[in-house]
Structures are given as structure tokens and as C-alpha cells.
Amino acid sequence: MAAARSTWTDTRLDDLKETVVVIDEKVTALDKKVDEGFARADRKMNEGFARLDNKMDEGFARLDVKIDGGLGRLDGRIDSLHHSLVHGMIALISIITVLLVALAGIVATHM
């Protein structure tokens, strides 16, 4: 391998300058492409989110139902479900209490 030169001639410096300029132009072009790509991705994401928002709004609008004579939305349906679950739990607890009292009565009469 040849020994590296320790001095820079004008020709070598001009060659280096041209190489640096070419690399700079390539980096600038690549930077521009990357920026354009991110701008396209941002536009697509914003359009997608806008479509999703519209679909969700349309879906929630379809969930309008009559509850207790009034017009309720999704929260009204959830409240109705909550009330049904509470009433069911009260019924189950009542049945279990009656059965335990009946069992205690049977055990007490047979002792």
C-alpha cells in the first residue's frame, strides 16, 4: 500500500471540494425526499383520523334509543343495563337468603 501523502495539492483540494459538493447535493435531495414523505404520511394519517371520527359519530348517532319515555344515548343504555344487573343481583340474594332460612328451619326441626 502506498504511503499516504502528507501534503495537499491544489488539484487534490479541488477534487475534494467537488466530492463534498456532490455529497452535499445528494444529502439535500435526500432530506427533501424525507420531508415530503413525512408530509404525505401526516396527510394520510389526518385523513384517516377524520374518517374514523366521522364513522364513530355516525355510529353513536345510531345508538339513540327511547329510555323511560325520553330520548337517551349510549349512556342511557348503559344506565338501563346497570339497573337490570342490580335488580337481578337483589333477586339472587333474596332467593339465597330464603333457601338458607328454609335449610336452617329444616335442620332445627330435625335436632
Image (spheres, helix red, strand yellow):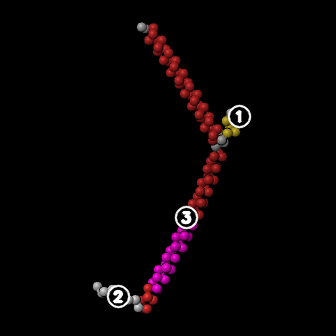
Instruction: Pick the quarter of the image with the N terminus.
Output: bottom left
As drawn, 66 above or below 51: above
As drawn, 60 above or below 87: below
Earlier in the chain: of badge 1 and badge 3, it is 3
Residue beneath the point at 50% across and 15% down:
101
Q: Residue furthest left?
A: 1
Q: Relative to 107, is 4 on the left or the right?
A: left
Residue beneath the point at 45% across and 10% down:
108
Q: Closer to us: mark 2 or mark 3?
A: 2
Earlier in the chain: of badge 2 and badge 3, it is 2
What are the residue bounds of the magenta stretch? 17-41
Whether the residues at callouts 2 and 1 have beta carbons within 8 Å, the answer is no
Q: Quadrant of residue 82?
A: top right
Say what secondary structure mark 3 lies in: helix
As drawn, 26 above or below 86: below
Residue beneath the point at 52% across and 21% down:
95
Q: Relative to 83, is 27 on the left or the right?
A: left
Instruction: From the top left corner, tell me how far across and down residue 46 is, in percent.
Output: 59, 60
Examine the structure image and report whether residue 76 is included in the region drawn in magenta: no
Instruction: From the top left corner, tell me how far across and down residue 12 is, in percent.
Output: 41, 89
Q: Residue type at mark 2?
A: Arg
Residue nearest the viewer, comparing 77 with 31: 31
Instruction: From the top left corner, tell me how far across and down residue 43 is, in percent.
Output: 59, 63
Give the residue number, with chain letter if any, for mark 1.
69
Earlier in the chain: of badge 2 and badge 1, it is 2
Q: Residue type at mark 3?
A: Ala
Residue beneath the point at 56% across and 28% down:
88
Q: Quadrant of residue 45?
A: bottom right
Give the residue number, with chain letter if any, for mark 2.
5
Whether the residues at callouts 2 and 3 have beta carbons within 8 Å, the answer is no
Dot 3: few (<14), some (14–19), or many (≥20) neighbours within 10 Å? few
